[in-house]
Image (cartoon, rainbow, N blue to C red):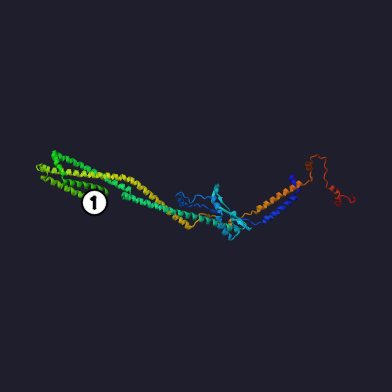
Amino acid sequence: AELFRAIRRKGLLIIATTLAVAIPSSVWILSQPPLYEGKVEILVEPPYKNRTSLSFLQQIHGINFSSESLNYEGQLGVLKSQLTLAPIVESIRSKYPEISLSVSKNGKKTENLADALDVKQRAGAKDKEAPIIEVTYKNKSREKVLFVLEKIASGYIQYNKQQQVRQLTQAIKFVEGEIKRVREEVYQWESELEKFQKSRGLILEPTRQADALKEQLTFLRQQREAVKLELGGLRKLFRLLQNQLQFTPQQVTVVTRLNEQPNYLKLVSQIKDTETQIALETLRFGPQNPTVRALTDKRNQLVSLLQMETGKILKNPSENPSLDFIASMPQQNLEKIQQFLDTYNQIQVLQAKDRGLEEALVTLNKNIDSLSTENKQYNRIVRELQIANESLTRLLSVRENLQIQVAQELSPWQLLTPINENIIKDVSKKNLKLAAAVVASVFLSLFVGLLADALDTKFRSLEEIKNTIRLPLLGTCPYNKNLAVLFPGNHKKARKKGLISPQTL
């Protein structure tokens, strides 16, 4: 209540103070030029990020040409650096020479662009920062704000384009070095593969050649089984004929001497050699090869000569006196003897053939065993060659892709805000400032009024007297405004009002 009484007593002072402060403040605020603000947004990480080429390079020797996410703190510092802003300022100074990057030393009024710009990352949803950079600029001229932001946006995109070209050029240079190195690896592995094939005499791949050798091994085993089967039958026949002829040990010796004759032995030896050659050539070329057929014909001719030589020896008793007993034998015994000798010769031929097949099987098994080791070496060389070729193909594709990107001169940054009048807004806030000035004036006037009331020493109520003297009051005189005219100096006013007669006092 006392506060309101004080405000009422000093109301005139409060109103006067309010008007004295509010009117000049409002006039000053309204006289100030407006302040305009413009903001552009740049998308610095497009959603279609194509990092395939450079990510492949990142796997080579651990070199990183492009990170998966942008270092915004460092990037914002680079965007406000003098190196980045220098060409932008030069383009702006053609129209607004007061724009600079340094403080004026000649007393001229300049504007530091680095300090005037507000570059930050835009906040995204769910407290996550968006891959967008906001550039804000304020000035008293709408035209200047629009012009500066246009130059800033184009300058930043041009800067990123140059950085992209520089990075791609560096990547191309590195890729060309890698292509040269990988090509040398390809040539090296191709040369090693060729040497390996020549040194091992490989016509086919080791796996395919091993399969071919296994087929030949199966064929030779079948041939040997057939020879053994035939040899077993001839041996039974030989023993049967020997029992039928009832040769004495001396007669058996005479008959077997046929094989001790030089010509006979020579023919037998030639037949053995021919059988061995047939087995080996069959192993190499197959049974239908012309060479194998020629050797088979040669063997048949030698067998015919052997039979003729045997007949010649048996028909010449003078050279073999111990064979006189043959002449006294019936003709059927002579035929059995001839059959006996033919069987003996066939057994010798088959034994030679069996030995040749056995040697061929041993050699073939050794070749198959060695091919398993050679196959591992061959597969290792082929695998390394394949890896080198794949790397070379990918590097060539990467180089072509990088060259296309450099030729296109595309910047991965995109301007999201069109540069027009719509991005400019008035941020002077004059209405808010006027309201603040009025409120401040009211509070200031209240303070002044209360202060003046506190400094006033007049008593206007009994409570004020009691609170001041802190003594009991003996009594009070009622207030009568007419009594004031009785004081000296007020008689003239009293006479005019007719409160006293002219003769009084």
Q: Which residue is mark 1?
A: 291
- Horizontal side of residue 181 vs 372, given as left or right: right
One can see residue 303 in this view: yes
x 66%, y 52%: residue:
433
- Secondary structure at badge 1 equals helix
Instruction: Locate residue 70, reporting x and y percent.
Output: 52, 50
Single out the residue that lies furthest toward the right: 503
CA neighbours of label 1 inside 10 A, class few (<14), some (14 to 19), many (20+): some
Instruction: Locate residue 477, reporting x and y percent.
Output: 83, 43
Vertical order, 425 against 343 (above or below): below
- Horizontal side of residue 407 vs 447, given as left or right: left
Give the quadrant of the N terminus: top right
- Which residue is more in the foreground, 492 or 427? 427
What count of labels does the image hold?
Answer: 1
Instruction: Locate residue 489, reporting x and y percent.
Output: 86, 50
x 45%, y 56%: residue:
403
Amino acid found under the numbered disc labelled 1: Thr
- Which residue is more in the foreground, 5 or 377? 377
- Horizontal side of residue 144 vs 339, given as left or right: right
One can see residue 150 in this view: no
- Which residue is more in the foreground, 421 or 116? 116
Single out the residue that lies furthest toward the bottom: 94
Instruction: Locate residue 69, reporting x and y percent.
Output: 51, 49
